[in-house]
Image: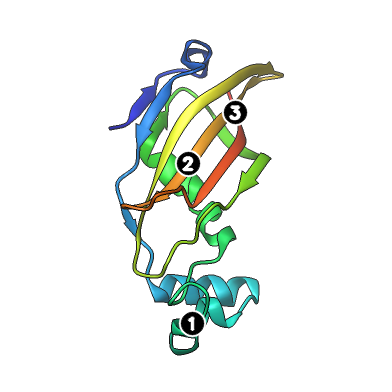
Amino acid sequence: MSTTVSSIDEFHPLVGTHLGYSDWENIDQARVNLFADATGDHQWIHVDPEQAKSGPFGGPIAHGYLTLSLAPVLLNKVLHVDGMTFGVNYGCNKVRFPSPVRVGSDLRLGAAVAAVDDVEGGVQVTFDLTLEVRDAPKPSCVAQVVYRYYR
């Protein structure tokens, strides 16, 4: 399920609305290794499957920030915004990682509109995002993120 906004002015009535969920995205070791290379974080719990088997999670896990970095990509699968010239990721109000994303897991994003504020030339939209692993008892990442969309 996805939501389409035809104009940024259509965001205001969406406050409090859950927009839906993305499809499931598999988090494989290759993706984790690429993220480790990009960030320089090669901690064994992420990149050494053999050593990670005896670690606290029973196998390698994705970096928390890898999970968060998937939010814009997965949000684009939940929300389509037309009638804008451009949008920017303005930041995060709060981010937590309640449970790990084990390598090989499927992850999806759910999104709700928490607030909409007018800014010069556009709107600032605050989203409540939940990234969850299939069949996990707790979400892997909960974040309140802020985007700006301009006319």
Neighbor class of circle 2 (other Cα within 10 Å; few <14, some 14-19, many 20+) is: many
**Earlier along the polypeptide chain: callout 1 or callout 2?**
1
Residue where numbered disc 2 is placed: 130
In-image side of 22 versus 14 (left or right): left
Considering the image in quadrants, where does the N terminus appear?
A: top left
**x and y percentages locating residue 50 in the rendered image:** 44, 89
Q: Name the amino acid type tagged 1.
A: Ala
Q: In which quarter of the image is residue 6?
A: top left
Rendered location of residue 78, percent (x, y): 37, 36
User: Mark 3 falls on what kind of element?
Assistant: strand
Q: What element carries label 2?
A: strand
Q: Residues within 10 Å of mark 1 (few under 14, many from 20)?
A: some
Q: Residue at x 49, y 67 (%)?
A: 62
For residue 52, the mark is 1
The reply to whether the C-beta atoms of the residues labelled 3 and 1 are less than 8 Å apart is no
Q: Which of 58 and 76 is in front in this view?
A: 58
Q: Residue at x 54, y 33 (%)?
A: 128
